Amino acid sequence: CAEIAQGRHRIIPAKSPLLSVWADDFLATVREPSTKKRYSSSVKHLKAFFQKARLAEITPRDIELFKKQRLGKGIRTATVNRDLAVCRRMLKLATQQRIIGENPFAGGEFLEERKERRLPHILTWKEQDRLLAVAPPRVRMLIVLGSETGMRTQEMLQLRWTDVDLEKEAIHVKKSKTFSGIRVVPISGFLKAELLRWRDLLGPDFSEWVFPQFSNTRHRLQGGRRSWKSALKKAGIPYFRQYDLRHCFASRLSAAGASPITVAQMLGHNTTGIVQTYAKVLDDTRRDAIVKLEQFRKSHEVENPETPRPEILQ
């Protein structure tokens, strides 16, 4: 009674909200558009399964039944795990706000997905040569940027020219999937040449975005999958996700002699403690890693043919 009087004890409501209602409130707290879009897909499936269930009524068994239903429809384990992760986060938020007394996620509910995980395609040097030779300028720029920096696709598409410092040879990633993804990525000589080519092709006043929509330059590129798929086909390379360029970068960087911690830092997988403790050392190491990558490429005598300047943007 004393705790209640002093406001230190919060009473859990006798009637918790419907999951469908709470899900909408939860989505309203997600600020990142791409994350909200991803969560919305999972919320749709959670609403369909739990329909009229209230938060306090959801049990570990219900979660197991949800998994079985999704798997029974042939949904991949990775997709089901994403749905479960959203459900867990929703229920955790409800627990923190004392909407429910206990989160039914007790641990161990996620599925083993490594066996089904699609192996990334590591682009070989020869494949990259063929791909760059046939790719439209915009796709070419994305290929070079992805394979030279390991940036996530959305990180690349969200780049503004003000984020690219060609003088200091660095890219400032200001928007990322995680806090550790906010980082400074060194620019190699090869990438710098491509960025200069791309900027000259667009023109200095064409758009603030590095990858704009050509139909409306005020907006950044949203898609581009069709052009990516077409370029791979022309180069005679089996289809793989553009995201795999991130794996390609990490593999090449490791082969060039960069340490695991440097690779993790470059990819934006570092922890806050590591960044604060080794910030200066890692900045120097990152630059050294890019130099090693440049030397590694030259050792393979890769020829990067000049792309003729097209008369119109593709």
Image: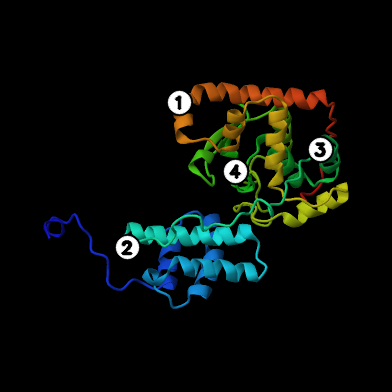
The residue that mark 3 highlights is: 124
- How far apart marks 2 and 3 lie (CA) works out to 53 Å
Residue density around tag 4, few if under 14, some if 14–19, many if 20 or more, within 10 Å:
many
Q: Is residue 13 left or right of residue 195?
A: left
- How far apart marks 1 and 3 lie (CA) works out to 36 Å
Q: Element under label 4? A: loop
Q: Is residue 161 above or below residue 233?
A: above
Q: Is residue 227 above or below residue 41?
A: above
- How far apart marks 1 and 2 lie (CA) works out to 39 Å
Identify the residue at image location x=83%, y=33%.
Answer: 304
Image quarter where the N terminus lies is bottom left
The residue that mark 2 highlights is: 101
- State which mark lies toward you, 1 or 4: 1
Q: Measuring from the top left, give residue 273's x and y in whole percent.
A: 44, 32
- How far apart marks 3 and 4 lie (CA) works out to 26 Å
The residue that mark 1 highlights is: 277
Q: Element under label 1? A: helix
- Mark 1 vs mark 3: which is more N-terminal? 3
